[in-house]
Amino acid sequence: MVLALLILWGTAVVLHADLLPDKKFLLLPPVNFTIKVTGLAQVLLSWSPNPHQEQWNVNIEYRVKINVPQEEEYETRKTESKYVSPLHQGFSASVQSILPRDGSFLTSSSSSWVSAELQAPPGSPGTSIVNLTCTTNTAIDNYTHLRLYQVSLRCTWLAGKDAPEDTQYFLYYRYGSQTEECQAYSKDALNRNTACWFPRTFIKSKGHEWLVVHINGSSKHAAIQPYDQLFVPYTIDQANPPMNVTAELEGTRLYIHWEKPVSPFPTQCFDYEVKIYNAMNGYFQVEKVSTNKFISTIDDVSNYSIQVKAAVNFGCRENGLWSEWSQPIYVGKDEQKHLAEWLLIVLTAAICFLLLILSFACRMCHLWTKLFPPVPEPKNNLKDLFVTTNYEKTGSGETETEVISYVDEPGLEVLENSVF
Ligand SMILES: *[C@@H]1O[C@H](CO)[C@@H](O)[C@H](O)[C@H]1NC(C)=O
Ligand SMILES: *[C@@H]1O[C@H](CO)[C@@H](O)[C@H](O)[C@H]1NC(C)=O
Ligand SMILES: *[C@@H]1O[C@H](CO)[C@@H](O)[C@H](O)[C@H]1NC(C)=O
Ligand SMILES: *[C@@H]1O[C@H](CO)[C@@H](O)[C@H](O)[C@H]1NC(C)=O
Ligand SMILES: *[C@@H]1O[C@H](CO)[C@@H](O)[C@H](O)[C@H]1NC(C)=O
Ligand SMILES: *[C@@H]1O[C@H](CO)[C@@H](O)[C@H](O)[C@H]1NC(C)=O
């Protein structure tokens, strides 16, 4: 079987060898290679097959090599290629003719390279913007009655450290074939634009195209270098906070529930984080959940604040950014009510204690009067008592010890009386 396959393969190689060029055959490079800017941070590379190329049965293909700003190599059968890249540092690429790498050729064959380049746009060093950050957010479009989703874009940046004071910056974005200029800038202390807000854009929240941001500028004193940056939209897409967060307390069980954020993604596409903050002791509990509810056991004498945030999970696309926390909602006892309750308890305890002391004091007084008034004549002593008791004793011979114990243990009576 293996032998048969080997023989077959051998025949195939021999057949192809008949089609292969002889040693003198030369693969010629393509001609008229040009690079044309077709949009923000987008170029079209195009070339033509060499008219002097000797023809034979195999189609020639091309290898494209990007040299600046970032090296990359790829192959194509076409004679043009669209490429997206920042252009503020210039752009340079090369192309060569190759024989298709199709396994039946034992050696690869290629022509020499032809190159072309775009110069970096003019500008003084240090004048271009720095620290560009952009985020997108999806909202329901209020301008139509269709309740379509609308993606907004917000970008911030800083003026270049060597940009003249009169520099003004302008931001443009491109998504697919659509390009828009910013209409709503925020400014720094020198009145230079340093942030932009697009309430609506052509960006699709589930799309996969590059988002290109281009910021150029002008000044009377210097040429301002432009700046390009590419964004993968999902990496800068910030989810909305979950909606309609509710919390219910049943005894010590805390039931928290919410609804998915405004988003074109369905319910199962979200992860959430629930933050339960105990206002009494300042303790945070943060839990990650992938459902719309969370149940926790809490100590019901405190006031809790509850917030939830959301992010699209990995099951639906690569993770984006977490939303802001939802507005806090509160459950549990009001701190002031709580304080009042404590005050009430303390007050009750104090009153009880006071009453106790008072009654104790009364008992003491009572005892005092009980202990001493029965002895109106101090001369009367135990001996008289003995006389009396002895007199009583005449009734029964066994009461003697009882009588003595009564005399000896007056403390017992005090104790018994003081018991409430
Ligand atoms: C290359 O460009 C030149 C000038 O634009 C043109 O005359 C020529 O026909 C082109 N060659 C090919 C093969 O397209
Ligand atoms: C701007 O970015 C640079 C480097 O990327 C960083 O060192 C610097 O702290 C950033 N400046 C501000 C104000 O964020
Ligand atoms: C639509 O209206 C809601 C409230 O009615 C508001 O919060 C939201 O920001 C609006 N969205 C847009 C895109 O204007
Ligand atoms: C900035 O770029 C836009 C878009 O390419 C262009 O229309 C505009 O003329 C440029 N402005 C300056 C000052 O370079
Ligand atoms: C919030 O939830 C309550 C009860 O679960 C429901 O009646 C109400 O319609 C919800 N509100 C919104 C804006 O979804
Ligand atoms: C809990 O605390 C918050 C803020 O400290 C307060 O607004 C709220 O009224 C308190 N009580 C309850 C029962 O939510």
Image (spheres, rainbow, N blue to C red):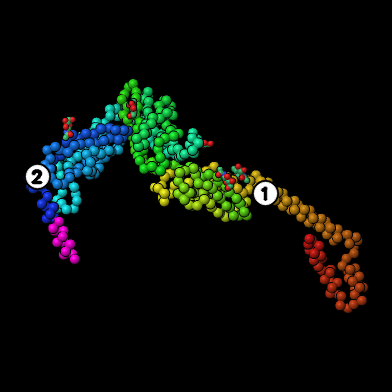
Residue 60 position within the rendered picture, expressed as x and y whole percent measured from the top left: 17, 44
The residue that disc 1 covers is 342
Residue at x-position 44% and y-position 47%: 312
Marks 1/2: CA distance?
100 Å
Disc 2, ligand 1: is the CB inside 8 Å?
A: no
Left or right: where does residue 157 sit relative to residue 24?
Answer: right
Query: Within the magenta stretch, is there residue 5?
Result: yes
Residue at x-position 53% and y-position 44%: 243
The residue that disc 2 covers is 25
Image quarter hosting the N terminus: bottom left
Residue 150 position within the rendered picture, expressed as x and y whole percent measured from the top left: 45, 38
- Amino acid bearing label 1: Trp
Dot 1 alpha-carbon crowd within 10 angstroms: few under 14, some 14 to 19, many 20 or more? few
- Amino acid bearing label 2: Phe
Corner quadrant of residue 9: bottom left
Question: Which is more foreground, mark 1 or mark 2?
Answer: 2
Query: Within the magenta stretch, is there residue 199?
Result: no
> Number of callouts in the render?
2
Image quarter hosting the C terminus: bottom right
Dot 2 alpha-carbon crowd within 10 angstroms: few under 14, some 14 to 19, many 20 or more? few
Q: Earlier in the sequence, mark 1 or mark 2?
A: 2
> In the rendered structure, are the residues bearing label 1 and label 2 in contact, judged by CB atoms less than 8 Å apart?
no
Ligand 6 image position (quadrant): top right
Relative to 349, does residue 173 appear above or below in the rendering? above
Q: Residue furthest top?
A: 220
For residue 109, say whether it is visible.
Answer: no
Segment tinted magenta in the rendering: 1-12
